[in-house]
Image (spheres, rainbow, N blue to C red):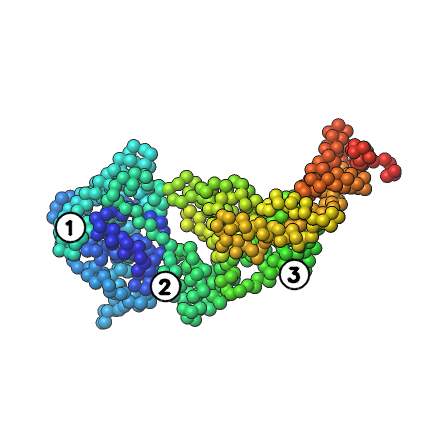
Amino acid sequence: MPLWPISLGWELRRGRQIVLHGEVNDRFWLDGEPVTFRELLVEYLLTTGAEIVGWWDPVDGLTFPVEGHEMRFRQAASGHGVRAAEPDAAAAEPDAVDPDPGEQQTAEPGTGTTQLSPRRARKEAASEQVASQPSTRRIMSIHDVLGSVRRVASRKDVASAFVLQDIDVVLQPDRPEGATEYLRLRAAMNEAVVPRAREDDKWPQARNSVLVVTGDVSRLPAWFCQEDPQVKELRIARPDAAERRLWLSMLRKQFKGASGDADLEPLVGATEGLAGWHIDALARTSVIRNAPVQKIGRLLDAYNFNVRSNPWTQLDAGMVAASGNVLARRVIGQDAAVNAVAQVLQTAYAGVDFGAQAGGRPRGVFFFVGPTGVGKTELAKAVAALIFGDESALARFDMSEYAQEHAAERLAGAPPGFVGYEQGGELTRRVQERPFSVLLFDEIEKANAAVLDKFLQILEDGRLTDGRGETANFSQSLIIFTSNTGASGLADLLAAASPGAPVRYQEIQRHFKKEVKEAFDNIRRPEIYGRLEPGVVVFDMLRAQHVAGITERLISLLAESVHERHGVSLDVDRDAVLAWVEERMKDPEKLAFGGRQIRNEMEHLRAAYVRYYVTAQPPPGAQVQLTVDPAGKFIVAPALAGGT
C-alpha cells in the first residue's frame, strides 16, 4: 500500500475531512497487485469499519461498491433504523494478504464453481450495479446527494464514508448556485459525527468521512479549504523511489530481458517523475519496441519520444567528422570555438558516456562567452541547421526577460492555484513538443539567480518537472548559454597590450574564463559553474584579417535574397565594397563591436539597392550592378550589355 492512505488515516483521526487531489487517476498497488485509486480508497475505508461506503461522480451518480451498503444507506437516509452490518472479510482482517494475482479465482472442492477474493467480488459487483441498475434508481443530482450524505453522516448509529469525485466539474464556484452547493458540502463535512461503533476504539476516533476527490484542487473555491480548519487538502504525489522500485519489481516479468530485480534497478532513478500508469506503459514499450532493460537509453528514448527516427542517429558520419569545416563557413574567425563545438557534436553522435545513467543528460551543454557581435548566436543557429536540418529547431530564450525572481515560474510553469498553471512552462512545453532541439539561453548573465537554479536539475539529470507534474526530458536537446560577461573589461586588456603586438587568443580566453567564474561566485552559485565549466567556449575578438571574409559572406547573402525575392541578378563590385568596409572598420571602436558592426556598415549597401528597386522597378531577369566610389557614394545601375 502506498503512503497516502496512511496520511489519510491520521488526518481523519484528527477530526478532519479531506480533499484528495493530484494523481487520482493513477494506478496503485495493494497486496501485491495493481489497483485503481477507487479500489484502494474503498478497501481502506472498509478497514476503518465503515458500514456504508458510497461513491458519487457525475457519470454514474451515487453507487455503492460493496453489496448491502446501498440498502443500509437508503434506510439511514430515510431516517429508519439501519440493519446491522455483517462482518466483511477485508474489514475484519485489514492485514490479510490476498492470494497471488494469478490465483485470485479458486474452485471450491466438489462444486466446480469459482470463488472470488472479497476485493475481486466487490469490483465485479460494483460493475454489475452500474451496468444493470437504471440511472433513474440512482441518485444523480449533486444537490440530492449532498442532502442525503448530510443526513447519513450525522447519524451516530451507523459508520459511513462518502467519496465525492469530480464535484468541481458540475459546481461552478463563480455562480450563486454553485457557491451554495459548496456551502452545503462543507456543512455535511462539518456535521459528520463519530459513530458509536468507533467509540470504544482508541482515542482519538475518526468521524464519518465525507471526502472530496479532484485532479486539480485549484478548481475548487479558494475559501473552501482556507477558511475551514476542519477541511484539509491531501495531495497524492507520483511514486517516490521506493514505490517505483516496488512497481518495477511487480512488473518485472513484463519487461523484455529482465531476469531479476537487479536488471531493473537502473530504471528506479531513470523513472523519477513517472506515474504508476507510466511505468506500466514503459514495460509495454520494452516489448512493443523490442527495447530490453539492459539498453536503458534506448528504452527511455522509445518511451519518452515515441519516434523511430532519431535525428542524432540519422546524422551522416562523414558530415559529423567534417562538422568543424561546415560551421566555420558560417562563423568566420572563431576556429577555437568552432572546433570545441565540433568535438562535442562528435561525442554526442557517438552516444557514449560514463555509465548508463549519463544517457539522461543533454546531448551537449555549451557556455558561449566573448565580446559582442562575434558570432555566438550565429554559431547556435548553424548547429541547429547542421543537426536537425532546420534553424527552427533552435528555441531562443531572451534571459533579460527573466530578471525578476518570479520569472522562474515562466520556465517550468506556475504551481497549482496560480494564474497560468494550465499552460505549463515556456521551457518545459517547448521541450515536450519538440524534444530534438537546440535551446539557446541568450545573455544568461541578465537572469535572476533563482532562474539559474532551474538549470541545475536539467544539467545533472536532464529532466525538469513543470507545475502540472509533467516531466520534460532534455536528453535529446543541445543546450547553449551565451554571455557577454567580461566584455566590458576587454578594452583594458587591449590598452595594456604592447603597440603593434595584438592580444593573443590565449590571453582573451583566460580573461573571460576568469570573469565568468567570478560572476557565478558573486551570485553564490559555484555549483552551476562547476557543471558548466567543461562547456565554456570563449570567442575571440574580431580581428582585421577576418573583416574580408565576413563582408564576402554578407554580400553573397544579400545577392541571394535579391534574386529570391525579385528575380534580379545583383552584381556587386566586391573589391570596391570590401575596400570601403575595411577602411571604415579600421576604427578600433567599430572593430570592438565585432561582426555586428560590419553588418551595420553593409546596411548602406542594402539601402542603395532598395532605393533603386523602388524607383526603377527592374523586371525579373534583369541584371543590376552595384558599386561604391572613392567618396563613399553607392551607385546602382542596370548592367551594361555584354557585361562592360
Q: Which mark is residue 317?
A: 3
> Which residue is at the front of the view, 260 or 131?
260
Sequence-wise, which precedes: disc 3 or disc 2? 2
Which amino acid is tagged 1?
Pro
Q: Point out residue 156 in the picture as x, y percentages from the top left corner.
A: 14, 48
In the rendered image, is residue 554 in sight? yes
> Mark 1 sits on what residue?
195
Residue 587 position by quadrant: top right
Sequence-wise, which precedes: disc 1 or disc 3? 1
Using a 10 Å C-alpha cutoff, classify the residue at mark 2 as few (fewer than 14 neighbours), some (14 to 19) or many (20 or more).
some
Q: Point out residue 466 in the picture as x, y percentages from the top left corner.
A: 44, 48
Q: Is residue 554 left or right of residue 124?
A: right
Q: Which mark is residue 246?
A: 2
The CA span between labels 1 and 3 is 74 Å
Sequence-wise, which precedes: disc 2 or disc 1? 1
Residue extending farthest to the top is 615
Which amino acid is tagged 2?
Leu
Q: Quadrant of the C terminus?
A: top right
Q: In the figure, 420 relative to 270: above or below?
A: above
Q: Is residue 639 left or right of residue 399?
A: right
In the rendered image, is residue 395 in sight? no
Using a 10 Å C-alpha cutoff, classify the residue at mark 1 as few (fewer than 14 neighbours), some (14 to 19) or many (20 or more).
many
Residue displayed at 26% across by 57% down: 43
Using a 10 Å C-alpha cutoff, classify the residue at mark 3 as few (fewer than 14 neighbours), some (14 to 19) or many (20 or more).
few
Contact (CB < 8 A) between labels 2 and 1? no
